[in-house]
Amino acid sequence: MDYLAQQRKNQLFDIKSLTEDYMMGMAMRGMVGRKILLQQSILRHEKRRRWLTGKLYDVEVSEQVATREFFPTEFWQAVHQKSRWILGISLQGWSFGWADTLGLNYFLYRDRKAILANLLTVVGYVVAFYWLFTWALGNWFPARALPPLVESGEIWFGLTIAVVVLLIWRLLNRMFAVWRIYGPLHALLAVPRLFYGNLLNFCATVKAIHRYTKSRISGTVPAWGKTSHAYPTEAQLRTYRRKLGDLLLERRMISTAQLEEGLAKQKATGRKLGDILIEMGAVWEEDLVLALASQRNLKAVELDPSAATPELLNLVPREVAEKYRVFPIEVRGDVLVLATDKEEHVELRKTLSTALTRPVTFQMTSAADLKFAIERAYGTVQRAPRTGVPRLGENLVRSGRLTEDDMRKAVRTQKRTGKKLGEVLVELGLMSSAEIEQELKKL
C-alpha cells in the first residue's frame, strides 16, 4: 500500500479502470521484493450419501479459500459482466505497454490475445461446421464430394492435429478440476459448456469493443456497470464454517493450551468441544455462543428481560417461548426478532412464522440467558415498566464502582443462580453488604 501510494500520489486504485484490481497488480511490478499467490486450504466436514445403501456418512474435505460468489447464470448478465473484464484487462490494460522481461510479456500477451482469440473461435466453429458438411457430403454422395480444405501432407494439417490435441488436453484438465469440486455429472457437462462459454466470450468481446470505441470517440470513461451477483444461501454457507477453536483463539477467549486440552478430551470422549471448554471453566457459555454465532454468520445477544415491554411479550405467548425456546427482542418492520439457543433455524423459522402469523428472524443466545429471561420477563409482564429509573448494575458501572467486565461476570452468575444481583456481588467479593445497601438507597 505504501509503495502504491508513493508511485500514484496516494491513489491506490485506478478509478478510471473497469478492472482496478488488475491495474493495481500491474502497478506493483516495479516493487522490489518477492511476490506470491497465496493459496490457503481449510478442512471442513460434510455429509455424503453412500451410493449402494443410501446412508449418510461424514467426510473431511480439504478446500482452498476462495470467494463464495456465484457468476451470473443468465446469459446476457454474464455477457455484461465479462465484457467489463475484457474491456478493463484486454483493452484498457494496454496503457501499461509491454514489460522488460519475457515472462511478464508472455502473461500480458495471454491477457490481450483474448480480443482476437474470442472472435476467431466463432470463426473456427464456422470452419468446423463447413468441414463436417463437406465430409458428410463426400461420404453420402461421392459424386458431389468437395476438395478438402487441407491436404494431409501440408503443414496446416499437422498444426490442426496439434491444436486438437491441445484442445483435448484442456478439456481433460477442465473436467478434472470440475470433478474435484462439483462431482462427475458436472465434469461431463464441462464439454458442452465449453461451446456455450465460447459463444458468451464472443458476445462479450463484441460488446467490450463497442463500449471501448464509443468511449474513445466521446472522450469519456466507460461506465463501470456493476453486475448483480447471487450469493450463497445460509444453508450453503453452513458447510464453510470456520472451526470453533480458531474463532475462540482469534477472540482471545481461550489460550492455546486450553484448546489443546479441550481437543484431547474431545477426541477421547466424542463430546462437543464447546461443552468441554465450558466444563473446564475456560470460557463462559455466553462467549461460546458469540463464537458460534460468528461461525454461522448470525448475531449473538445477551438478553435483558427488563427491556422487554408487555406489548413485545404479548407477541410471543409464554407457552410458545418455553416450547420452542425463544424470546422476543424487537420488531423490525413486519419482522419479529427472536433470541434462541438452538443452532438450526430453518425449520424453526417456518414453524414460528406460521404460529405467530408474521415473519421471524433469529439471534443466538445462551441457554442460561434464555431461561433467565423467560422466567423474569413473563413473571413480571403485568407490572408497570420502570421507565427512567436506573438499575443497580447500571448505576455501579456508571459511577465507576465496578468495571463492565466485573458487572458482566456478576450478571452471568446471577442468571445461573437466580439470586439477587447485590447478593452475587457480595459473594464474588466485588462489594460489601453495606456498600450494596448504600447504593440501593440511591435508586
Image (tube, rainbow, N blue to C red):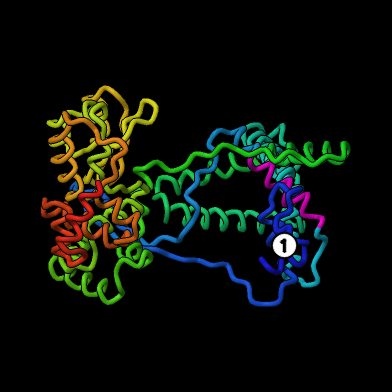
Q: Nearer the viewer, residue 340 or 36?
A: 340
Report the residue marked by disc 1.
26
Which region of the structure is painted magenta? 81-95
- Of 108 and 15, nearer the camera is 15
Compared to 353, does 200 lie above or below?
below
SS label for mark 1: helix
Q: Is residue 228 magenta?
A: no
Residue at 30%, 61% (x, y): give it: 401
Is 91 colored magenta in this rendering? yes
The foreground one among 124 and 283 is 283
Closest to the observer, 257 or 313? 313
The type of residue carrying mark 1 is Met
Residue 221: image location, x then y, percent = 79, 42
> Horizontal placement of 54 versus 97: left or right?
left
Residue at x 46% of width, y 52% of height: 178
Q: Quadrant of residue 362?
A: top left
Can residue 255 be seen here? The reply is yes
Q: Is residue 155 above or below residue 183?
A: below
- Number of callouts: 1
- Residue 306 position within the rendered picture, expressed as x and y whole percent measured from the top left: 23, 40
User: Above or below — where is 426 with respect to 82?
Assistant: below
What is the magenta segment's predominant secondary structure? Answer: helix
Q: Is residue 157 visible?
A: no
Q: Position of residue 275 (x, y in %)?
A: 18, 60
What is the x, y in percent for residue 379? 12, 35
Q: Which residue occupies 14% across, 71% down?
A: 268
- Judge the density around disc 1: few (<14), some (14-19), many (≥20) Cα neighbours within 10 Å: few
